[in-house]
Amino acid sequence: MNESHYREIEVKMKQIFLNFTGDLEGEYISLVDMTRDEQNQLINEHFLFKGGDKFLQSARSYRYWPIGRGVFMNNNKTFLIWVNSEDHLKIISMQPGGNLASIYKRMIDGVRVLERQLTFPSSSRLGFLTFCPSNLGTTVRASVHIKLPKLSLLKEKLESVAQKYHLQYRSTRVEETEPEDDVYDISNKRRLGLNEEEAIREMQDGILEIIRIEESLE
């Protein structure tokens, strides 16, 4: 993509975002209009992406940065869309607690609004097409942030559960190798070869097992 492509996508999405109503209604903020402090605050709150990843840099994902980039947030900050971060769009539904049904419904509602004016490229073999091959398929990454003070000392046990339920665990800040205060980001690993509900259910079943083990440890 050249610079004009980034600008055109942002302009188009700003118009589409005006169609969000009710719980989805919110505001779009362009990266070029944010101060450094505003960016850092949103990044720390997990509401905004950032540059600097060496692999994305090598893949030329940061061309013309920050032109054409930004974030849409609904008023409750539970529904976000990142524009031109890695993919053209990254759609996020999030909230405190464990009500996965509410989070998933909000995601579906938002995608349905987008589908009225957008077409998402897909392949009969690979599913939805994405910048990173690991996201091919459903593209769904369902994750929770959970504190595991006991299991963090038993990495082999945590790894065993993760393998059984096809989970990935990492720090809540991707660039850090060790979790801060024993808080992990745990998500489904598989996107390809299953549907969206199956991907979410895999994560849910694995998290419930992890909670059971954590609570059983002395």
Image (cartoon, helix red, strand yellow):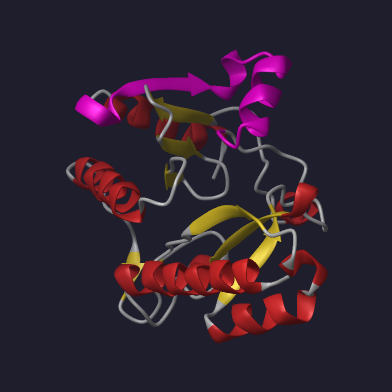
Of all residues, the one furthest to the front in this rendering is: 218
Q: Answer above or below: position of 177 versus 115.
A: below
Q: Quadrant of the N terminus?
A: top right
Q: Answer above or below: position of 32 versus 84.
A: above
Q: Is residue 15 left or right of residue 35?
A: left
Q: Answer above or below: position of 10 versus 167.
A: above
- Pick whichever, 151 or 140, lies toward us: 151
Rendered residue at 77%/81% (across/down):
156
- Pick whichever, 4 or 165, lies toward us: 165
Q: Is residue 19 visible?
A: no
Is 46 colored magenta in this rendering? Answer: yes
- Chain part drawn in magenta: 20-47
Q: Answer above or below: position of 72 versus 55.
A: above
Q: Is residue 113 left or right of residue 67?
A: left
What x and y, as percent, mark residue 207?
A: 51, 67
The quarter holding residue 28 reads top left
Q: Is residue 187 left or right of residue 156?
A: left
What x and y, as percent, mark residue 17?
A: 30, 28
Is 23 colored magenta in this rendering? Answer: yes
What x and y, as percent, mark residue 159?
A: 70, 79
